Amino acid sequence: MSVRLTDGDQAYLAGDHGPSAQSAMRIVVRLADTMEAEGLLDITGAHIDSCLYHGPAVLDFADWLADGGAQVAVPTTLNVSSLDLLHPDLYRGDPDWAVQARRLMERYEEMGCRPTWTCAPYQLDIRPSFGEQIAWAESNAIVFANSVLGARTHRYGDFIDICAAICGRAPAAGLHLDENRRGTLLVCLEGLGDDLLDRDVFYPVLGYLVGQTAGHDVPVIDGLPPSVGEDRLKALGAAAASAGSVGLFHAVGSTPEAPTVEAAFQGVEPERVVVVSTAELRVARDALSTTGDSRLGTVSLGTPHYSVAEISRLVELLDGRSVHPDVSFYVSTGRDVLAEVGLRGWEEPLRSAGVTFVTDTCTYITPILAETSRPAMTDSGKWAYYAPGNLGVEVVFGSVEDCVSSAVAGEVVRDDGIWGDG
Amino acid sequence: MADRPRVLVAGTAAGEVLRLDEPLSFWGGVDPVSGRITDLRHPQVGQSVAGRILIMPFGRGSSGGSSVIAEGIRAGTAPSAILLLEPDEIVTLGAIVADELYGESIPVVVLAEDQHSSLRTGQQVTVAPDGSVVGT
């Protein structure tokens, strides 16, 4: 074992903080060793993905830690789970599965985690600031924290998230370190019209393409308008982390470590350069849909969880109209965001218009959809990516404007004019 | 490269190689009950990873992959080894935690490029604790 440990780390390994903390530290050190970390570093917060039920192993693990009295050492938020605790009737799955999933959620609460149940912890009241070292799991949250907030987390998976939270320590390696945050791949946008760059739907499509291209590179995207908004960067990152293994990207002129191309590359030449034109974007857009069927059973928005601003946009687009009676319309969001939406007086009108809010979970990870025989439409590159495999549903990707028009019409309506089709 | 093979999780395994044409996310990509690939966008959708010596460059996508690998090891539907071209923490963690929790795991090894590219679907191979891979 080549990882240099402090006396404090050794105390954990010796069991001074109890048997669970000892196990947690052993796992942190084992992972640090495989990452060739020189040591561990202090973290100021964690976000846990391990609270999503995948079968007995994840509950065995949580029981193993919680039964030994484990408590988190740093403020820790919880990702989506398998259940919507605020709207339990939405669950259409196996009741035994739900019992196990609920038990898993309770175990993480017992360990002192905050029951936020959202995949967008960066939309909560408290979020990490620039330069903070954190241990986050959930691929879209990781890429947002690193890229948009400039906080520092490696691309952590389940289990290590809670182990790091219990010890307050993480491997000093990977994206925690300056040198690994340097851009390595330059993505140049070429000949794209302002009308395309100014549409929400462009960002998840670009993200999908970047994810497919990047491999383990840190992409630097040059050619976006200045100061791209957080919701667009969120959609870009979520799609990139689904189609690839991107844990950090830089958008020149928008993200904090990329005021210029040179800064994003830390003064070093890019190892690779790719040019993105409208033609490649059209291919990526088409790859996000699995069918050309115009029948519509479902619209699902909010992957990652919709923000207050995105729900405000939905209110605007619906403009008093109602969802067609043959279409189920879901918006997944955090319980904190839904509370804010309620305070602003938007929740009841949206429900009356036919919108079903889903909190604490997401429509593609647990059985919620009323039917999967007709296609589902989404504005999310991540949902479009995973839902066909998870749910066995055909998917049509479109803009939020297309999703709303289609929901009202009761069939798929897409305006592809901005993509220069034809 | 001099440091290859690099053992991320040590163990022994024997079985038939399944070479993946593209990286795979275990979460949303593999059903831990059957071991089958469920990602409809993956060229090898429908094939089973259970008991196979899985060859892929690195993992992809969701953080939940660690849980799906640990669950697969518990349920006996995981690959019998995963041989990578680049280290992948999400894959590694699933194997480490199954080891800590159940005392059962699978080897995860980063191979040199020439060896990684030489392994073909259908070959019978063994993986040793030092990460060496030998045809049988």
Image (cartoon, rainbow, N blue to C red):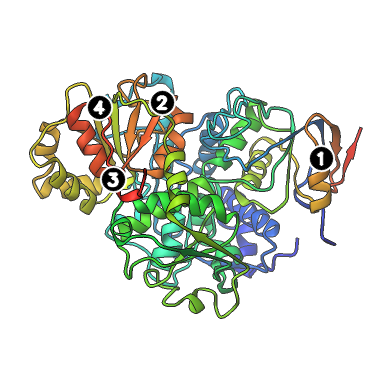
Q: Quadrant of the C terminus of chain A?
A: top left
Give the label on residue A52, or none.
none
**Can I make out residue A126 in this image?**
yes
Mark whose residue sits in front, 2 or 3? 2
Mark whose residue sits in front, 4 or 2? 4
Please say if the residues under marks 1 and 2 sit with CB atoms less than 8 Å apart.
no
Discs 4 and 1 share one subunit: no
- In space, the residues marked 4 and 2 are separated at their CA atoms by 16 Å
Say which residue label 4 marks: A411
- In space, the residues marked 2 and 3 are separated at their CA atoms by 24 Å
Locate residue A197: give its quadrant: bottom left
- In space, the residues marked 1 and 2 are separated at their CA atoms by 35 Å
Q: Amino acid at mark 1?
A: Leu
Say which residue label 2 marks: A393
Q: Residue at x 53, y 30 (%)?
A: B40
Say which residue label 3 marks: A334
**Left or right of A417 on screen, residue B110:** right
Q: Residues within 10 Å of mark 2 (few under 14, many from 20)?
A: many
Give the label on residue B119, or none.
1
- In space, the residues marked 4 and 1 are separated at their CA atoms by 48 Å
Q: Chain of mark 4?
A: A
Q: Secondary structure at mark 2?
A: loop
Above or below, comparing residue A211 to residue A396 in the picture: below
